[in-house]
Image (cartoon, helix red, strand yellow):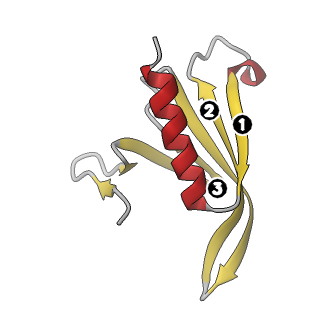
Amino acid sequence: MAEKEMTAQSGVLTYKGRPLLRKGNVIYYGSISDKYISMLQIMASKEENGVEIPTKIIVTIQHTDESMRPKERIVKSSEKSGLYEAMDIATIWLNRYNSAK
């Protein structure tokens, strides 16, 4: 089962200990207090049993430094065919980049 939880006091959805925030077709994953966050853009989806299932997602890892231009913030990018694959690579990248010194 996926490691997601709703914290009682803040009402923030988390996945593997990191906050998730969705705005339209964009999911922000990670904490703004970390050096890097991940952005997942849902580019295409299909309906299955009345539920929209993402079928094409662009995953990027970005610096959280707001003094940088938006294009300069992007460190790495990849296209994935499902939400599980996208969250999996985002988690790996966040672990790798936020733990690097």
Q: Is residue 31 above or below residue 20?
A: above
Residue type at mark 1: give it: Ser
Q: Is residue 13 above or below residue 44?
A: above
Q: Is residue 22 above or below residue 94?
A: below
On the question of residue 29 being in view, the answer is no
**Badge nearest the viewer, 2 or 3:** 2
x 54%, y 59%: residue: 84
The local secondary structure at tag 3 comes to: loop
The numbered disc on residue 77 is 1
Question: Separation of disc 1 and disc 2 at Cα?
Answer: 7 Å
Q: Are the residues at dot 3 and dot 1 in contact (C-beta closer than 8 Å)?
A: no
Residue type at mark 3: give it: Gly
x 35%, y 66%: residue: 1
Residue type at mark 2: give it: Ile
* Residue at image mark 2: 61
Q: Position of residue 83 (x, y in %)?
A: 59, 60
* Residue at image mark 3: 24
Q: Are the residues at dot 1 and dot 2 in contact (C-beta closer than 8 Å)?
A: yes
